[in-house]
Amino acid sequence: MQIWILEKLQTASEETFRDPTNLQAKIQKHEAFVAEVQAHANAITKLDKTGDDMIQHGHYEKETIRVR
């Protein structure tokens, strides 16, 4: 899950959207990106809750968990 999130963060931060050429392909790429994020929404939410629970229960790596 961590690798997938990092890949999506990299995709979301790309600057290629500023180039106005090939807009239809960019729209399709964006729609696919949104669909993929929505498909993983439950896993992301569960991961976030698990991390919060670990922090609240004093896990020995709670600072690392908080950063991630």
Image: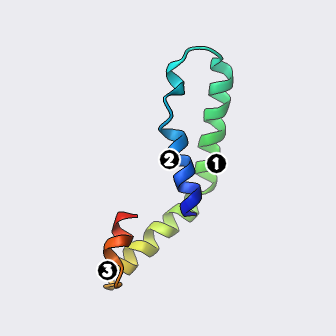
Residue 27 location (% of width, % of height): 63, 27
Q: Which residue is mark 2?
A: 9
Left or right of residue 52: residue 35: right
The residue lying at 49 percent from left, 20 percent from top is 18
CB within 8 Å, label 3 to label 1: no
Residue 21 location (% of width, % of height): 61, 14
User: What quarter of the picture does the N terminus occupy?
Assistant: bottom right
In depth, the one of 62 and 45 nearer the eye is: 62
> In whole angstroms, how far apart are the C-alphas of marks 3 and 1?
30 Å
Q: Is residue 33 above or below residue 26?
A: below
Q: Which residue is mark 1?
A: 36
Instruction: Label 2, secondary structure: give it.
Output: helix
CB within 8 Å, label 1 to label 2: no
Q: Is residue 39 above or below residue 31?
A: below
Amino acid type, label 2: Leu
> In whole angstroms, how far apart are the C-alphas of marks 2 and 3?
26 Å
Neighbour class for label 1 at 10 Å: few (<14), some, many (≥20)?
Answer: few
Mark 2 vs mark 3: in front: 2
Neighbour class for label 2 at 10 Å: few (<14), some, many (≥20)?
Answer: few
N-terminal-most mark, 1 or 2: 2
Amino acid type, label 1: Glu
